[in-house]
Amino acid sequence: MSDSTRKPWSRLFGAADLVAAFVVLLGVFAGLPSRWLPIDLAGGVLGALFLASGVALLANHRKAPLLARVAAFAALAVGMVLVLALGVSASWLAGVYGPVGRGGALLLVLVAALVVPYLLLLPAAQLLWIGPRDKAAKA
């Protein structure tokens, strides 16, 4: 992809990555009421990857596509696991606790709906924008 076609999208995805870093870090470290190492570690690494990718894309660094690709794959992995866990938890709550559990299940479904744009749609769009690695970049 040439520099002239990449620049406007680089700025857009760079800004989107910075917003995603802010949302992930805020959600994990300010939104969650208790600390748990696996969640804190995944959120911290994902936030750092989004931050590095966003800054590299905005600065038009030569390693920006690689950083964006790594951040996007990590976000997709974390996002899919998180949406799966939220869906299973919501169905368990609704099934075991009946009408009382449906309120908790609804809350988990809403959280999953908030996760989808930042951890599934944005990374998928970035991977489509970056495209496959070409052989010239490997050399």
Image: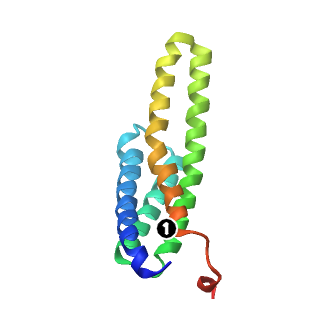
Q: Which residue is the extreme one toward the bottom?
A: 139
* Viewer-side residue, 76 vs 49: 76
Q: Is mark 1 on a helix, strand or loop?
A: helix
From this view, report whether residue 113 is shown above or below residue 15.
Answer: above
* Viewer-side residue, 58 vs 39: 58
| Image location (x, y in percent) of residue 31 | 37, 41
Let me know if residue 35 appears in the view. Answer: no
Q: Which residue is the extreme one toward the right?
A: 135
Residue indicated by mark 1: 68
| Image location (x, y in percent) of residue 32 | 41, 39
Which colour assignment does the render follow? rainbow
Which residue is drawn at the image coordinates 39% and 78% (left, top)? 60
Which residue is drawn at the image coordinates 39% and 52% (left, top)? 25
From this view, report whether residue 100 is shown above or below residue 105.
Answer: above
Indicate left or right for 7 with 64 as reference: left
Which residue is drawn at the image coordinates 52% and 11% (left, top)? 99
From this view, report whether residue 43 is shown above or below residue 33.
Answer: below
Amino acid type shown at disc 1: Ala
